[in-house]
Image: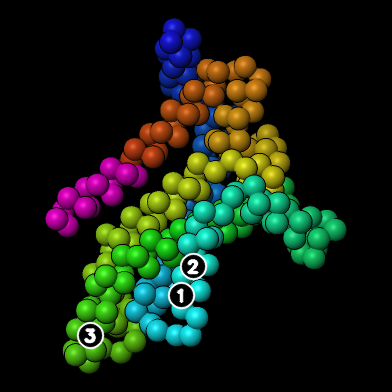
Amino acid sequence: MGQILEGTKSALMLLLSFDREIYGIVGLSLYVTLTASIISSFVAVPLGILLAVKDFPMKQFVVRFVYTMMSLPPVIVGLVIFLLFSRSGPLGVLRIIYTPTAMIVAQICLVMPIIIGIVYNGTKEKGREIQEVAETLGANKMQTLVLLIKELRINIFAAIVTGYGRAISEVGAVMIVGGNIRGDTRVMTTAIAMLKSQGDYETAIAIGIVLLLLSFLINSILYKLQQEES
């Protein structure tokens, strides 16, 4: 316990010293996770809504597939992305392995099914009712989609927050495709894993504190929106 308290005290001093390397790691983490979450949201939110309100052949199979992808092990995603984009892989010509771009691709693969699944679950309960109201008012398909997004905004935001939580806490996939290269692809989670193995607990705790503060901030926003909605 004493080691944790002493490490936390030293970590806070380190944060207040505005250590350039730590804040560089935090900045890269935010860039990778936010980019992956934003791209995933633009694709996954409409897909989740359409999956809930539209009937089509093999819909149940698609839903089960999405649920399976929601729990996809990160190391498998990392391995597949690595094999695809490695120098000898079919997409190796793009030369993105061991770059933040490869880390974003890996995180999109992890985050997108989560957002689709949560939006689907939230929409299937009252999505058809909203859709019928929109059709009664003469709304076209785009206006109906906009209305669905507006009425289901809390559920959608919760899905995005959950997806972002997965992205910012991810270790395995980003370690495999990013390589944890200092000053280039090192993010908070991979840095903590490395610092722990090196016995540098102060720096690891400092980065962990930033990670927790970010999670607290995002979930506080979600909680406030839910309170206002209720």
The magenta stretch is 218-230
Image quarter (top left, top right, bottom left or bottom right) of the C terminus: bottom left
Q: Position of residue 88 (x, y in %)?
A: 85, 58
Left or right of 216 in this view: 106 = right
Tell me, yes or no, whether the two marked residues, 2 and 1, touch with CB atoms within 8 Å: yes
Tell me the residue that label 3 is attached to: 132
Is residue 229 inside the magenta stretch?
yes
Circle 2: is it few (<14), some (14-19), or many (20+) Cα within 10 Å? few
Give the image's coloring scheme: rainbow
Tell me, yes or no, whether the two marked residues, 3 and 2, touch with CB atoms within 8 Å: no
Kind of residue at disc 1 = Gln
Circle 1: is it few (<14), some (14-19), or many (20+) Cα within 10 Å? few
Kind of residue at disc 3 = Glu
| Alpha carbon distance from label 2 to label 1 | 6 Å
Left or right of 68 in this view: 88 = right
**Vertical side of 65 occupied by 36: above or below:** above
Res 64 label: 2
Q: Position of residue 27 (x, y in %)?
A: 52, 40
Extreme-right residue of the structure: 88
Mark 1 or 3, nearer chain start: 1
Kind of element beneath mark 1: helix
| Alpha carbon distance from label 1 to label 3 | 22 Å
Kind of element beneath mark 3: helix
Kind of residue at disc 2 = Arg
Left or right of 91 in this view: 3 = left
Kind of element beneath mark 2: helix
Circle 3: is it few (<14), some (14-19), or many (20+) Cα within 10 Å? few
Quarter location, residue 101: bottom right
Residue at horizontal 64 percent and vertical 54 percent from the top: 77
Res 60 label: 1
Quarter location, residue 138: bottom left
